[in-house]
Image (tube, rainbow, N blue to C red):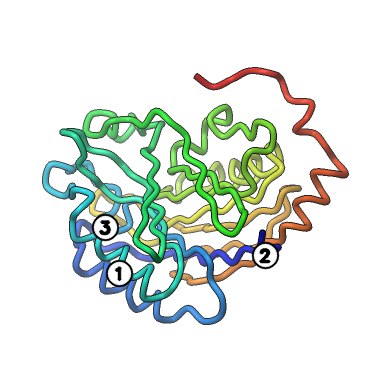
């Protein structure tokens, strides 16, 4: 197990429904990363923005954007993560992909669909949590609106070390974004990484970013607002272990299971 985990957050402006422009921009941002990186995280629906047009935009798992992720993961020798619109078994999903340099893929389908924007009318909901692993670290993969549902993030028996939330979370509710990220870190005694976007989409939604990293006591490690950003944050396993050992709160949690 590595005592450190280097996570790079990319907070971009997303060009509305223009995959070509977005992927080209990400290549430039990826090229700008210096130093060690284990995982590089892009936001929710990173290639299109938060679109309710999966009939036009969805790709299969063999599609161009997934192949691009494989190519970039291999080229930059890192895990590349983020969500995009996927068609699978005659359904559309807001799917969080975790793409390894060897081409292996783990995926999580967004469980909580944002009915306020009609997401539930266009996408199928996932049914299982997914915990990925890298160098002995266990990573809980989550998407945007999942953040509002603490039971779904419940860290039963300390089964994960880091929760990653990718999002298109608008400025008007940015207080909730920042507050809930911090709350998830405190209640689950884990690191929480939230990756959001900036700019304005075609529907007039404005995004302030506020991509953040919180420590297992809720301490703010890094946060960036308003502009694009590429930032690598180093998480410390010894710090996490010491906090859980000194303050074994997870052991006192109510005993129930998610079905």
Above or below, 38 relative to 153: below
Marks 2 and 1, how far apart at CA: 25 Å
Query: Closer to the N terminus: mark 3 or mark 2?
Result: 2
Q: Earlier in the sequence, mark 1 or mark 3?
A: 3
Q: CA distance from mark 3 to mark 2?
A: 28 Å
Relative side of 29 to 232, left or right: left
Check disc 3: other Cα within 10 Å, few if <14, some if 14-19, many if 20+.
Answer: some
Identify the residue position indicated by label 1 in the image: 71
- In the rendered structure, find residue 248 and report the number of the disc placed on it: none
**Whole-number angstrom distance, CA of label 1 to CA of label 3:** 9 Å
Report the residue at 53% width, 44% height from top: 140
Residue occupying image coordinates x 48% and y 45% = 141
Which residue is tagged 3?
Answer: 66
Q: Earlier in the sequence, mark 2 or mark 1?
A: 2
Q: Is residue 158 above or below residue 217?
A: above
Quarter of image, res 143: top left
Which residue corresponds to mark 2? 4
| Observer-nearest of 65 and 199 | 65
Image coords of residue 59 (percent x, y): 18, 50
Q: Are marks 3 and 2 in contact (CB under 8 Å)?
A: no
Examine the rendered structure and indicate whether residue 87 appears above or below residue 47. above
Image quadrant assignment for residue 27: bottom left
Query: Which residue sits furthest left?
Result: 56
Quadrant (top left/top right/bottom left/bottom right) for the N terminus: bottom right
Q: Residue at x 19, y 34 (%)?
A: 89
Quadrant of residue 159 in the image? top right
Choose between 34 and 177: the one closer to the eye.
34
User: Is label 1 in a helix, a strand or a loop?
Assistant: helix
Q: Is residue 87 above or below residue 224?
A: above
């Amino acid at each position: 197990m590595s005592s450190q985990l280097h996570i790079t957050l990319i907070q971009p402006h997303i060009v509305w429904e223009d995959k070509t422009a977005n992927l080209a921009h990400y290549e430039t941002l990826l090229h700008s990363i210096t130093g060690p990186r284990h995982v590089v995280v892009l936001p929710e629906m990173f290639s299109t923005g938060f679109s309710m047009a999966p009939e036009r935009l969805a790709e299969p798992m063999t599609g161009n954007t997934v192949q691009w992720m494989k190519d970039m993961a291999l080229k930059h020798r890192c895990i590349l993560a983020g969500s995009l619109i996927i068609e699978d078994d005659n359904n559309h999903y807001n799917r969080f992909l975790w793409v390894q340099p060897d081409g292996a893929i783990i995926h999580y389908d967004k469980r909580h669909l944002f009915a306020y924007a009609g997401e539930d009318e266009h996408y199928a909901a996932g049914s299982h949590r997914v915990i990925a692993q890298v160098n002995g670290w266990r990573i809980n993969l989550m998407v945007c609106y999942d953040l509002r549902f603490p039971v779904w993030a419940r860290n039963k028996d300390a089964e994960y070390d880091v929760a990653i939330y990718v999002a298109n979370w608008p400025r008007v509710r940015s207080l909730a974004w920042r507050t809930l990220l911090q709350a998830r870190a405190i209640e689950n005694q884990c690191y929480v990484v939230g990756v959001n976007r900036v700019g304005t989409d075609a529907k007039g939604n404005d995004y302030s970013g506020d991509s953040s990293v919180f420590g297992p006591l809720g301490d703010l490690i890094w946060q960036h607002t308003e502009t694009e950003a590429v930032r690598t944050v180093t998480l410390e396993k010894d710090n996490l272990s010491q906090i859980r050992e000194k303050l074994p709160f997870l052991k006192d949690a109510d005993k129930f299971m998610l079905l």
